Image (cartoon, helix red, strand yellow):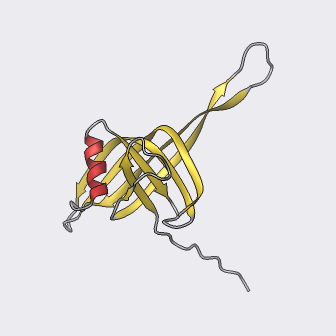
Amino acid sequence: MAVINYIIGTDAKIGVGVAGQVVPNGTFVDIGGVINFNFTITNDEIDFNSNDYGYDIKRYGRKRMSGSVEFLYDPGDAAQATVMLNARTPTITAMRLRPQGAGVYEEYAFNALLTSANPTAENNGNIRCTVSFVSAGAITWDANQT
């Protein structure tokens, strides 16, 4: 008999706050109506090659994060208003990503530059927004947030 493995869905959270907050103790407000969010962490490399070596020498370099969040627009949602405003103006925004939701789960926190906002009106009267971001500084990771 085959064993069936199920993947349990999560209530992922993405929060925003004022740039420069102390992470993880800063005050973050979760964005409501999130359809999905994604992010990629990239570890750049530093190339130490020279003509003296017959092989490549690489070291860890900068770490950066980029991604986007898609949500159904609610004019009364304070966090949505923050990201929409900060995407239109050059404002660094603190972000907290919790892919596994609230509770004792991993958290990524960082200051971000919101690079674009794309509100789209749909036939059913909803406004779907996508906001893209890139990290602007250190990325804090904590595996045991509450």
- Return the x and y of residue 98 as percentages of the image width and height: 49, 59
- Return the x and y of residue 52 as percentages of the image width and height: 79, 13
Q: Nearer the viewer, residue 13 or 23?
A: 23
Residue 71's quadrant in the figure? bottom left
Q: Is residue 129 above or below residue 140?
A: below
| Image position of 37 (left or right of 54) | left
Residue 7's quadrant in the figure? bottom right
Q: In the rendered view of the protein, which quadrant contains the N terminus?
A: bottom right
How many marks are shown on the rendered structure?
Answer: 0
| Image position of 130 (left or right of 126) | right
Q: Nearer the viewer, residue 123 or 137?
A: 137
Q: Is residue 11 above or below residue 87?
A: below
Residue drawn at x 30%, y 43% as measured from the top left: 87
Residue drawn at x 33%, y 52% as measured from the top left: 130
- Return the x and y of residue 53 as percentages of the image width and height: 79, 18
Q: Is residue 140 above or below residue 32?
A: above
| Image position of 120 (left or right of 13) | left
Q: Furthest-bottom residue in view?
A: 1
Q: In this view, does 121 lie above or below 112?
A: below
